[in-house]
Image (cartoon, rainbow, N blue to C red):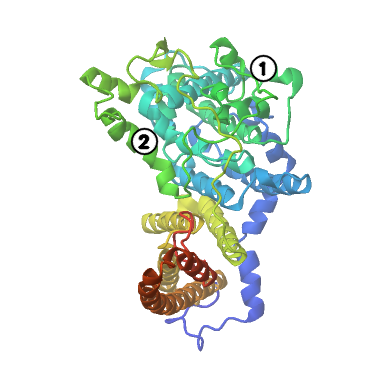
Amino acid sequence: MGPSCALPSPLNCSVSVSDWLSHLFTNTSLAYRLYARLDLTNLRHSLYLLSPYESAVPKWEEVPNYNIQVSAWWMLLVFVEFALLSLTGHSDRFALNDSMCSVFAGMLSQCFKFGGRAVAIFGYVWVWEHFRLIELPWDSPWTWLLCFLTQDLAYYLGHRAVHEFGFFWGFHTIHHSSEYYNFSTALRQAAIQDAGLAAYDILQAFLIPPSIFLVHRYFSEIFQFWMHTSLLGSLGPLGFVFNTPSHHRVHHGRNAYCIDRNFGGVLIIWDRMFRTFEAERKEEPPVYGLIRPERSFDQLWLQFHTLKELLCDKWRLKDEKGQKVFPKWTDKVKALFFPPGWFPGTKIRHFFHWTSLDDHTFGVPPVQMPVQKYDPSLSVWLKAYCLAHFLLLLCIFLHFEYDRAHLGYLDFTLKIAFFICTMQSFGAFFDKKKFAPFLEIFRSFGVLSYYITRTIIEHHKPQPNRIFIATLFVASAIVWVVVLLRHFVKKEAKAKVTAKDGKENRIIGNELRKDGMMEEKEEERKENTERRGGGERSKRDNCDCWI
């Protein structure tokens, strides 16, 4: 840190270039933390290949955050998959905006976990302490193996519930919103999904010690990262027992045969037992995404709007004639708790404590070919800008995850606010919203204010990493101020040209009407206007040309 000083001025707190670089790349220790986790043990763990003896601990507080342990491998595998897809001519299987949106969702889902743990653990511990039926030994391999099965069954039930149990679908929608299928899609998790899964996890608390449950809760989630790839085909006999990328591709498809199929986590036997298994069809490959594509990269919208629609809007629907779709109060209640695709008269069947559609393909429209994916065009420099800030955000987030237990409430809250603001800013850029530059300027000045305030309050000389980040955000703010000024100058000049052309056209039009030549000259006028760039923009580009 160096000697402290009253004020961080260049005169009494100078930092040499060598010190700056040294602190920037070693003091943060992020590179070392990531490198240390790129070992075979963590790679093995990412495949659920571990023994009971190396993971069983007596207290749930002693269970490490295995998501953080394997995060370095996840990052590496995402980049390796992108490289392989590009080299094999399948670059259409990923997109920069979509992948960033998926990673943002993963970050947000981790921010919503208390202490990085599953929300269920708190209720789980309470049930275990007060209502357990038997106390199985935490260090027994048989307890570990039993929990492997119970956790996978609980995941099947919870996963199926967030698809079929009414408004619970709103807890999970974002995971299916991507129109691509790659490793980054695995990270596209719902921030509030644990609220939907918690009740089914807690069912194990009558038998399984909390520490063993939490171990399997982590690894059940981690294993499924490998399911989200199109590079692996059928895995042969393994697919009779285990979930595979082929099986999970069906789960993510919006083809009629794919809807509400293959809910399994690690094992696929539950789908076979409960008749929800469907094999991938070579003649009809899955088309990914939602039945009604979202066509947005707004993170908060993707996370929460479906929940709002199911809770507040669905039961108030009206048909083309203005008649209520759910006329009875009982129908309105059913609209909240019956499957999302249910309407009065739809055949259903009961499963566990909820209902399923008797025909899972009912009401599913055919996929329109060719598929038009939502991918608004962006300039190369804007893509580079977003990528640079995305990598910085990733570094800050990993620091946050490593050190969150030691952060104060204010610092914790401000960092989450920064993450959300960044996600929203990039989503606005990807959607080509008019307000995107203004949000980015606000974000830049917010970060700058935070680091200046921290430096002054702590009475230390400026830390090299803070100098680097502050400089980057000052430059970013300047860039967008200049871009906006240039845009407004061009817009003003264009308005003057348009006004002048309009006046001339009115005079010419009056003369041409007298001679009966209006139609021919009108076409010529339109062509001239389009050559000047004054033609109508497409709906997608209806956001001014600041990008």
Quadrant for the N terminus, please. bottom right
Residue 131 in sight? yes
What amino acid is labelled 1 in the image? Val
Tell me which residue sits at (55%, 31%) in the image: 367
Residue 529 position (above or below residue 185): below
Q: Amino acid at mark 2?
A: Leu
Residue at 47%, 60% in the rendered image: 537
- Image position of 343 (left or right of 327): right
Q: Position of 247 compared to 5: left or right?
A: right
- Mark sitting on residue 241: 1
Please give the label number shown on residue 369. none
Q: Nearer the viewer, mark 1 or mark 2?
A: 2
Residue projecting furthest to the left: 329
Q: Residues within 10 Å of mark 1 (few under 14, many from 20)?
A: few
**Which of these two is toward me, 328 or 2?**
328
Q: Regarding mark 2 in the picture, which secondary structure is present there?
A: helix
x 51%, y 69%: residue: 533
User: Which residue is identified by label 2?
Assistant: 307
- 460 lies left or right of 281: left
**Mark 1 or mark 2: which comes first in sequence?**
1
Q: Position of residue 371 (x, y in %)?
A: 59, 39
Instruction: Quadrant for residue 270, please give it.
Output: top right
User: Closer to the camera, 25 or 112?
Assistant: 112
For marks 1 and 2, give the CA distance: 33 Å
Q: Residue furthest front?
A: 515
User: Relative to residue 408, is residue 535 depicted above or below?
Assistant: below
